[in-house]
Image (cartoon, coloured by chain):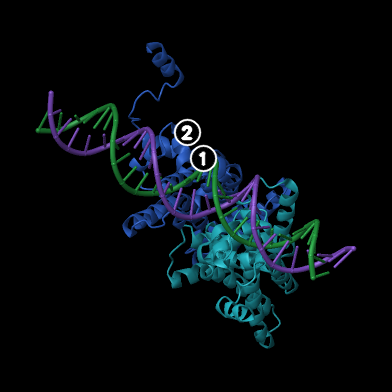
Chain colours: A blue, B cyan, C green, D purple
Amino acid sequence: MREDELVKERTQPQRRAYHHGDLRNALSTAGVELAREGGPEAVVLREAARRVGVSPTAAYRHFASHADLLVEVKHQAQAALADAMEAALASTAGDAAVDAGGGEQATRRLRAIGWSYVDFARDQSGLFRTAFCRPELTSQGVPAQARDRTETLDHFDAFRSFHLLRDVLDELLAAGLIAPARRPGAEAAAWAAVHGLATLMLDGPLRGLSDPARGQVVEQTLAMVADGLRAP
Amino acid sequence: MREDELVKERTQPQRRAYHHGDLRNALSTAGVELAREGGPEAVVLREAARRVGVSPTAAYRHFASHADLLVEVKHQAQAALADAMEAALASTAGDAAVDAGGGEQATRRLRAIGWSYVDFARDQSGLFRTAFCRPELTSQGVPAQARDRTETLDHFDAFRSFHLLRDVLDELLAAGLIAPARRPGAEAAAWAAVHGLATLMLDGPLRGLSDPARGQVVEQTLAMVADGLRAP
DNA sequence: CGCTCTATGTTGACGCTGTTCACATAGTAG
DNA sequence: CTACTATGTGAACAGCGTCAACATAGAGCG
């Protein structure tokens, strides 16, 4: 019997303890992995528990419901998108020295944001879909208090990407590349264009575009955004 | 026996026959109703059968799978959106007499399309979500042939809204309100902006906007599209 | 008319899901 | 050491999509 236990320990190094110790994180991490593989529909509570090596009901000690788990995963997906955008922005910083002072750097940064957005949607489609899956899908029957908290968090987390865009738009404004009258609401308009492009290319009628066609459409949209915000 | 039949006919006017006669249509209509009430996730085969008054398995005589039913409902939802856009376009026709010849009519029509789109997304959110739900959600395990057919239909049906937009953009081009260099790909860019706006206001961080704020954001986006397409 | 064949419906079952209830165990405080 | 709380397990429920076996309605043919 000793032998048996030793073998078990070697085979399953983590599952020795009755108490997991960090089950909530383990479950949400597994959930993120599921989302990455198959989008929000693939985030299934029982499967996450299975992957962590725990019974399905154990999850209910850390999440009120499947909806609650999905919200957690959704927030992490939103964070992953914001990370990708931030990384793209950071990689443009090296070109700063070449900036001629005419707001070219700001324009480059707007392009970087847009491209990283649509690239993330394509390369991490499961996470992207999860980041923007509808909250009600999961908030069925949850008391209003928890629901409100969820909504607030939604706003706040999504605003991380939002703030990145806002800052770039401010740079464009400072460089005179945005008409002041167009500044309010510009985040929404610019974001909408890029977001719509990403979703239409993912699930909509713009899906399956060849790489060149895709590139042209993205460029065309970014040009429309840049020029549309500069107008009188 | 005649008497019996008459009585039964009066009590259950539709359920008299063992054979329904038009079960496929009845099921897809019920499915559309479910979609209208709760989006694509609410389109559940057993419930549709229940509403039609038929056993769940009966649906499998007319649909290969739940996915197949959802695709049918999705197409009807796309058609409903196109109908709404067409109606909005038609209602602008009355103003034609007032057209000063400077492409104001075309501009009005672009605005009508955009507004009807976002209005449909808000007023028929279930149908809107269903019209753009991802096809893979339902095409799991379906043989490639059927899947290809589905994709083709997807493209074609979605193109009904697409063609409406295309025509309006052609009018704008004719009126000199679109730079010829910007014409190719303009459908994608314009559609992306409005579609993104609709989805962000539905499930995303732009949800719950007050009516004035909503109006301002929509106007701002439409202005960005119009001016962005007119550029050099 | 009666017989057969096919299209269309029903019943019952399977495995999957989210969820709950009763119970078991680990770690902690008194 | 004992009691309590936090955290796990197991069995069970209803609802879902789906399939296999069976039943009936209606059409075609003698």
Q: Residue at x 38, y 57 (%)?
A: A141
Image position of A64 (left or right of B54): left
Q: Which mark is residue A51?
A: 2
- Label 2 near label 1: C-beta < 8 Å? yes
Badge 1 density bin: few <14, some 14–19, many ≥20, Cα 10 Å? many
Amino acid identity at mark 1: Leu
Q: Quadrant for residue C23, please give it.
A: top left
Dot 2 falls on a residue whose secondary structure is helix
Q: Position of residue A93 (x, y in %)?
A: 53, 41
The residue closer to the viewer here, B37 or C4, is C4
Residue pointed to by mark 1: A34
Image vertical order of residue B43 relative to residue B164, above or below: above
Disc 1/disc 2 C-alpha distance (Å): 10 Å
Location of the N terminus of chain A (image quadrant): top left
The residue closer to the viewer here, B36 or B225, is B36
Amino acid identity at mark 2: Arg
Image vertical order of residue A115 relative to residue B58, above or below: above
Image position of B10 (left or right of B209): right
Image vertical order of residue B96 relative to residue A145, above or below: below
Dot 1 falls on a residue whose secondary structure is helix
